[in-house]
Image (tube, grey):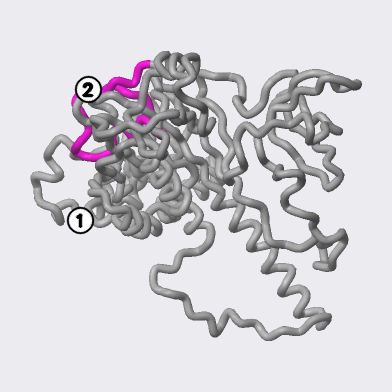
Amino acid sequence: MSKVFVVDANKHPLNPVHPGYARLLLKQGKAAVLRHYPFVLILHAEVEMPQLEPLRVKLDPGSKTTGLALVKDATGEVIFAAEITHRGAEIKHALDGRRGVRRGRRQRDTRYRKPRFLNCRRPKGWLPPSLESRVCNVVTWVKRLMRLCPLAAISQELVRFDLQAMENPEIAGIAYQQGTLAGYEAREYLLEKWGRKCCYCGATRLPLQIEHIQCRAKGGSDRISNLCLACGPCNLKKGTLDIQVFLAKKPDLLKRILARARAPLADAAAVNSTRWALYERLQALGLPVECGSGGRTKFNRVSRGLEKTHWHDAACVGASTPEILHIQGIVPLLINAQGYGCRQMCNVNEIGFPCSKPKGAKKVKGFQTGDIVRAIVTSGTKQGTYMGRVLVRATGSFDIRTKHGRVQGISHRFCTPIHRRDGYSYKQGADHAADPTQSTR
C-alpha cells in the first residue's frame, strides 16, 4: 500500500507512515495536511533525533513517460510509485509554430529582422527545449522527494539500448552475451521499434519471434537493421523466402517494413540524448547514483513476474533490486507535465498579427489559474460543493472545472485552495477510475 509522507514542524523529512496511522494523526490533531499531491502531512511538533530508514528512488526515464518508484532496499517494500508524462512533443510543436510565424513575417517585409540562428553560440551541455523539459521534470521530482522522505541513493536506467554491443556482440566479452542477460537488449529494442506486434500480420498479445528480414540461408546477417518481429505462423510461412517474394501481393506493407527496418527509433534517440545530462544532474544532488541497462531492467521484471508498466520497470532498475518486491496495494500517481503557460503577451491570428487584448493579471484575489480549490456555495442558483481546477477572472467571479464540466460564476469568497498550481496535473492510477482533482457536485 502506498505510504503517506510525513515531515516535522521544521519540514525535516521523516519515515513515511501507513495511511491508517496518518488518519489517526489527523484525527488527534497532531498533524495537518501540507500537500495533496503527493499527500504529505506536517506534524505540529519537532522530532528530535528520529530513526530514519533510508530509501532508494529508482527511475526509468522514457521519451514520453518516466517511471518512478521509492523502494526500501532492506525489505523490498515499494513505498511510493508514480508515472510522469512529459510534454516534449507539445514544446516542439509550439516552437515550430513560432518559427513559422517569424519566417513568414520576414518574407512579407512587414517587419525585417536578420535571422540570428547562424550566429548563435550554445553553451556546453545545451539541450533542445523539448529534451530539456524531460530532464527538468525528472530532476524536479527527485528534489521534491528529497524534501519529503529520507532518500539515501538513486538508481537510474542509464543505457536504454546498448547499440554498440548489438552491432558487435563480442565487444563486451563472451560472458556478457551468454549470461542470464543474453538476448534481452536486442529483444527489448525490437519490441520498441516494431510496436510489440507482428510486422507481417499485425497480431498482438501473443509470443513474438525474432525474424530475419533477409534470411540467413541467403546471406542475411544478424545486424539489428535486418531483424524484425513475427508471430509463429508468419515466421513458418515465410521460411527462407525472400521478403520481396513473400510480400509480392502486399507492396504497401513491403515498402513500410523496409523503410521501418532502416528508420531510427525516435523515442530511443531522445532517451539516449538526455541520459548523460540527467545522470550529471542527479549526481549534483549529492546522492550516490546507480546505473543499469534496459536489458537488466527487463530481466529483473520478468524474473519477478511483474507486468509491463512504467513504474514496475522503475522498481526493477539496477543490480540493487531486491529478490522480492512487495507491491501489493500500490496505486501509482499519474503526473502530467503541463507547464506554466507561455510568455506570449496576446493571441495572434494565422499570419502573426495581434488579435486580442494583452493578458491580464496572473493572480486574482490570491488565486491563479490551475489551482485546485474547493468551493462551498451556500446561497444562490449554484448552491452546492464543487472541487476542481479554477479559471480566474479579473472580476473575481471564477470558473471551476469539475468532473461533470465547467461551472461558471463562482465567487472567490466561496473558494478555498486545496493545491496550488505547480505545473503538473494529477490523478490516480488505473485502479481508481475517478480523477482526484475533480469531484462531483
The answer to whether residue 136 of the structure is visible from this angle is yes
Magenta-drawn stretch contains 110: no
Q: Position of residue 244 (x, y in %)?
A: 44, 47
Query: Label 1 is placed on what type of residue?
Result: Asn
Q: Position of residue 14 (x, y in %)?
A: 33, 32
In the image, is 212 to the left or to the right of 430? Answer: left
| C-alpha separation, residue under disc 2 versus residue under disc 1 | 34 Å
Above-or-below relation of 4 to 286: above
Where residue 194 sits, quadrant-wise, is: top left
Determine the secondary structure under disc 1. loop
Magenta-drawn stretch contains 318: yes
In the image, is 321 to the left or to the right of 342? Answer: left
Determine the secondary structure under disc 2. loop
Residue, disc 1: 168
Where residue 351 sits, quadrant-wise, is: bottom right
Q: Residue at x 19, y 36 (%)?
A: 320
Q: Residue at x 40, y 52 (%)?
A: 271
Q: Quadrant of the N terminus?
A: top left
Residue, disc 2: 324
Q: From the viewer's side, name the closer residue of 156 and 389.
A: 389
Chief secondary structure of the magenta span?
A: loop
Q: Position of residue 321 (x, y in %)?
A: 22, 33
Observer-side mark, 2 or 1, equals: 2
Above-or-below relation of 331 to 153: above
The answer to whether residue 313 of the structure is visible from this angle is no
Query: Label 2 is placed on what type of residue?
Result: Ile
Q: Quadrant of the C terminus?
A: top right
Q: From the viewer's side, name the closer residue of 336 and 237.
A: 336
Give the magenta range. Answer: 304-328
Q: Position of residue 151 (x, y in %)?
A: 30, 40
Neighbour tally class for label 1: few under 14, some 14-19, many 20 plus, Cα within 10 Å: few
